[in-house]
Amino acid sequence: MSSSDIFIGETIGTAVLILLGAGVCAAVTLKHSKAHNAGWLAITFGWGFAVLTGAYLAGGVSGAHLNPAVTIGLAIEGGTKWSDVPLYLASELLGAMIGAVLVWLTYYGQFRAHLTDPEVLKAHTGEEGMVDPAAAPKAGPVLGVFSTGPEIRNAVQNVVTEVIATLVLVLAILTQGLNDNGNGLGTLGALITSLVVVAIGLSLGGPTGYAINPVRDLGPRIVHALLPLPNKGGSDWGYAWIPVVGPLIGGALAGGLYNLAFA
C-alpha cells in the first residue's frame, strides 16, 4: 500500500464519513430541515450508514481506517506499520475537516436561518438578539452538528465512556481477522463495522454522544471555529481533549487486548 493510496483513501473515505455523519446531525438539528427533530435513532443509523459508505469507498485503497483509534489499534496489533501511522492520522484529520465544510455548504441556508431565528437565540442566550462573542457559551447552538458534547460534564466519566465505547469498536474490527481463515471479511467487514457503530450509538452513546474517533470530533470542531457562521457561539475547547484522548486510549487498549486474548 503506497503513501498515495493511504492519503487518497483515508482523505476521501473520512470526508464522506463526516459528510454523511455530521450531515444527519445537521438534518435533525437545524430548523427548516425536513428531518428536524427526527431523533436519536435517525442519528445512530445515519452514522452507521456513514461508516458503511466511507469504508466501502476506501476499503480497497487504504484499508479504510477512517479513525486514528483504529489506526493505533491496528499498529499495536501489528496489521499496520508504525511508519505509516502519521500519514494515516494526517489524512484522516484532513478528510474530517473537508467533510465538515461540505456539510456547511450542503446546509448553508439552514445554518443561516437557524442561527438567526429569534427562538433559537433566546433558547441559547436567554434573550433575543445577537450572541455576545465576549460571553460566548462553551457550546454554540450548532456545535452539536460538528462535534460531540456530554450530557453530564464530568471529565473522568466522559473519558471512561469514550474509552469503553472505542474499545468495543476497535476490538470488533480486529477480531474480524479471526474469521475466514484469518483473512478478514473483506467488504462484509464494512457492514459489520457499521452495525457495531449503530449498536454503540444506541447502547453507549447517551453520556457523550459517542465520538469514538478523534478526528470525527476534532476536525469538525476546528471547522466550526473557523467558519463564518452568524451567532455560532463557542466551540467548547475545554471539552475538546476528551473525545481525542478517550478514543486513542480505547484503541490502544483494544490492540493490546487483542494481542493478549486472540493472537
Image: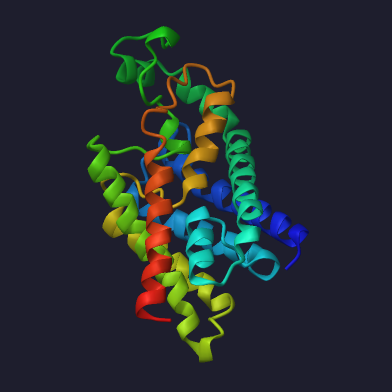
Number of numbered tags placed on the structure image:
0
Q: Which residue is at 50% across, 39% downward?
A: 218
Q: Is residue 99 visible?
A: yes
Vertical placement of 98 versus 249: above or below?
Answer: above
104 in relation to 185, above or below: above
Q: Position of residue 94 (x, y in %)?
A: 64, 43
- Front one among 16 and 115: 16
Above or below residue 207? Residue 72 is below
Where residue 12 sits: x, y (%)?
A: 67, 53
Describe residue 71's horizontal placement relative to residue 6 as left or right.
left
Instruction: Say which quarter of the image contains residue 81.
Output: bottom right
Residue at horizontal 46 percent and vertical 73 percent from the top:
174
Q: Is residue 86 above or below residue 195?
A: above
Instruction: Answer with the quarter of the image where residue 88 lies.
Output: bottom right
Q: Position of residue 56 (x, y in %)?
A: 61, 67
Instruction: Quarter of the image for the N terminus: give it.
Output: bottom right
Q: Residue at x 75, y 59 (%)?
A: 3
Q: In this orientation, which residue lies closer to the viewer: 123 or 66?
A: 66
For the residue pair 232 and 181, the one nearer the viewer reads as: 181
- Provide residue 189's location: percent of width, then percent of height: 52, 75
Report the side of 263 relative to 8 (left or right): left
The answer to which of 53 and 158 lies nearer the viewer is 158
**Any part of residue 198 in sight:** no
Q: Quadrant of the C terminus?
A: bottom left
Residue extending furthest toward the bottom: 181
Which of the 4 image quadrants contains residue 44?
bottom left
